[in-house]
Image (spheres, helix red, strand yellow):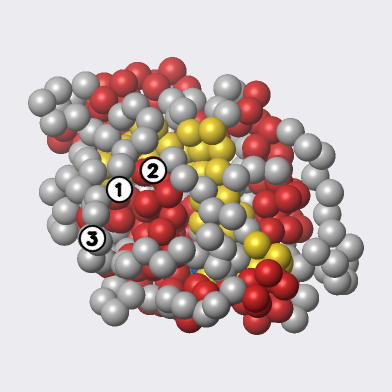
Amino acid sequence: MPPLVFPSPSLSTNLSSLHHSTIPCATHSRRPHLSGDPPRTVVITSGKGGVGKTTATANLSASLARLGFRVTSIDADAGLRNLDLLLGLENRVHFTASDVFSGECRLDQALIRDRRFNNLHLLCLSKPRSKLPLSFGSKTITYLVDALKTLEPDNPVQFILIDCPAGVDAGFVTAIAPADEAILVTTPDITALRDADRVAGLLECDGIKDIKIVVNRVRADLVRGEDMMSPLDVQEMLGLPLLGVIPEDAEVIRSTNRGSPLVLNDPPAPAGIAFEQAAWRLVEGDTMTAVALEEADRQPKKGFGWFSFFGR
Ligand code: ADP
Ligand code: MG
């Protein structure tokens, strides 16, 4: 992996922007082609807390489910469990994976079915604000994920998404253990990037080579004014392929409070469209290309306004 080189404080050089291809949000003329061998187990991680891992997990899960894939999302952030809130399922969590291992319930009883999509399930590792038992480590979660993969042989799960806790301690080591792929979420600031770079190194040491980045909370006006790192800067610093660029969007907070992932908004919100596009790329094993600001300015404007400023 290339060394992490941070840009000059002025950000005066190498400014760039991205513009997205224009994938329509809820109505698609085709279904994405599933690349890789299902079930695909993807961990959503970051290092730094509060950068958007749980938001990304909820929105990718809902997008994949709406596209017709069978999805199980695991909330592995035991202490600060909140994926259930973002999916609006907090009142339905009666059993958790810890209860499965203590013999209180079966695995299928701990799977919480989403209200909107029959093909989306949530699995929490433990009750809110309770710590995982010390015995719940890498081996246990790998056993759990293997059991999920074979739970319904006639209708097997296609995506298992794992919402990872912040930090790089035991919770992180546990969450990444069963994953074959990783989505590294970062915001375009130095502290998040430093942590993301460290996490990328740890993922590679653990044998996870398929790592893609999502740059969250990007503000086009600040990038243009050279007050925020561009997604291209971030990508070059981390030396990893780009899965998506998500704008700062107040609708994210509103949808969190409603317990409804933003990708389900009608009319679609900018961050929802960006998450939807990221989900398509995830399915198809695709990435996006960041383009330099000057190049973006030369491109004909098309599609969703803000997105015409982005990548391809
Ligand atoms: P993490 O799981 O990494 O700790 P969260 O997904 O819980 O992060 O997000 C942290 C906060 O940031 C939440 O309040 C969330 O609503 C907000 N947030 C995340 N992404 C965006 C965005 N693109 N625009 C605006 N707010 C965002
Ligand atoms: Mg979280």
Circles 3 and 2: CB atoms closer than 8 Å = no
The residue positioned 44% from the left and 55% from the top of the image is 278
Q: Which mark is residue 32?
A: 1
112 lies left or right of 5:
left
Q: Residue at x 83, y 54 (%)?
A: 6
> In the rendered image, which quarter contains the N terminus?
top right
- Residue nearer the viewer, 15 or 130: 15
Image side of residue 300 versus residue 283, left or right: right
Q: Which residue is mark 2?
A: 284
Q: Residue at x 50, y 73 (%)?
A: 307
What is the x, y in percent for residue 207? 58, 22
Q: Taking the image as drawn, is residue 283 in sight?
A: yes
Residue 264 image label: none
Circle 1: element type: loop
Query: Which sits earlier in the primary sequence, circle 3 or circle 2?
Result: 3
Give residue 29's mark: 3
* Cβ at disc 3 under 8 Å from ligand 1: no
- The answer for how far apart the CA atoms under marks 2 and 1 are is 6 Å
Front residue (pair 244, 312): 312
Q: Image point 73% across, 50% down: which residue?
A: 236
Labels 3, 2: front one = 3
Q: Position of residue 121 (x, y in %)?
A: 23, 44
Circle 2 sits in a helix, a strand or a loop, which is it?
helix
Q: Nearer the viewer, residue 257 or 200?
A: 200
> What SS does tag 3 mark?
loop
